[in-house]
Amino acid sequence: MTKYHIITYGCQMNKSDSERIATRLEIKGHKFVKNIKQADLIVINVCSIRQSAIDRIKSKIKQIKKSQPQTKIVLTGCILEKDKKQFKDQVEEIWPIADFKNKAKCESIKHAFVPIMTGCNNFCSYCAVPYARGREKSRSVKEIIKEIKNLINNNYKEITLLGQNVNSYKSEDCNFPKLLKLIINLEGKFKIDFLTSHPKDMSDELIEIIANNKNISKKIHLPIQSGDDVILKKMNRGYTVEHYKKLIKKIEKAIPNIKLSTDIIVGFPGETEKQFQNTVKLIKQIKFEHAYISFYSPRPGTAAYELKDDIPSDEKKKRQKILLKLFPKQYKFNA
């Protein structure tokens, strides 16, 4: 019997993937250990969207090899081909994350994560997801409903639907709002929320469903990334500041008790002080509960990698600190 430990980097999608990896390992008779020092096998679930994350993983592997030279190290997760090549000789194996499609046994009796789709078609200029996870692939309605029914029958009270862009879900003739309708009509006491949405795909139909159903969470995570139109265009986000502001007003009118959160990137190539102040201005106008604020990190293969990373690290950190002060609940995100 192998004793294993999983290290997870990144978002809720990665955490969900780790649950599925753990389930697969336990089916094969392996045993999870909380103490990494007791592990014969360490699985590192990677998020390689930002270079700083890759640097951290390199450091972690070096640390493990020094303190536990006999321990087997495996990488999986959101890994670019370039990163796979540099890690190839540092770890025993690299597992394709797409291989782990089995249902997860979640640790909490209250909360479960259910991926409904993976990959992304948006190709934001700074983001490695389409290259690491591929294009959007939606799970079938039948498979999702079956999994959620099983969770409800096993007394799970909170279910989070996951995807790089959940509101672009599409399986046959079922879009994301229709999927939500099918889920909320299931018998049982449970609450649904979802991550992550894209402003260009937040439809009136989806807003109406959230507004009119008490068992759908009144929390929406809606990344803005920048408050400047020039930077948004460079990022290939597909919307303007005005579009985003009108969308927020529409959401707040339909759902007065809504709690909003967002993502922001500071120090994108060419971001001037005036453009950064446009982001500050926007954040002061919108009542976000909290935000995940990161500074730009170039990733090979992305469109933004061809741009000059011309904002000094100290300036990026300064801008990050300025934004953090604007939020009652602060989330600093460098990885």
Image (spheres, grey):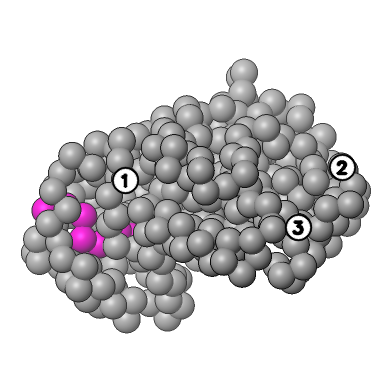
Q: Is residue 269 left or right of residue 145?
A: left
Q: Which mark is residue 28?
A: 2
Q: Which contiguous range is marked in magenta?
A: 262-270
Dot 3: what SS? Answer: loop
Picture residue at 18% right of the left edge, 39% below the top: 306
Mark closest to the chain's N terminus, 1 or 3: 3
Picture residue at 75% right of the left edge, 57% below the top: 40
The residue at which mark 1 appears reads as: 299
Amino acid tagged 1: Arg
Amino acid tagged 2: Lys
Q: Quadrant of the C terminus?
A: bottom left
* Picture coordinates of residue 155, whole percent (x, y): 88, 56
* Picture coordinates of residue 149, whole percent (x, y): 84, 41
Separation of residues labelled 1 and 3 (CA atoms): 32 Å
Picture residue at 44% right of the left edge, 48% below the top: 48
The residue at which mark 3 appears reads as: 40
- Above or below, 202 against 290 in this view is above
Toward the viewer: 133 or 291? Answer: 133
Q: Looking at the image, is mark 3 or mark 2 nearer the viewer?
A: 3
Is residue 41 at all visible to an observer of this figure?
Answer: yes
* Picture coordinates of residue 27, whole percent (x, y): 87, 43
Q: Is residue 288 left or right of residue 240?
A: right
Dot 1: what SS? Answer: loop
Q: Is residue 334 left or right of residue 100?
A: left
Residue 16 is one of the magenta-drawn residues: no
Separation of residues labelled 3 and 2 (CA atoms): 15 Å
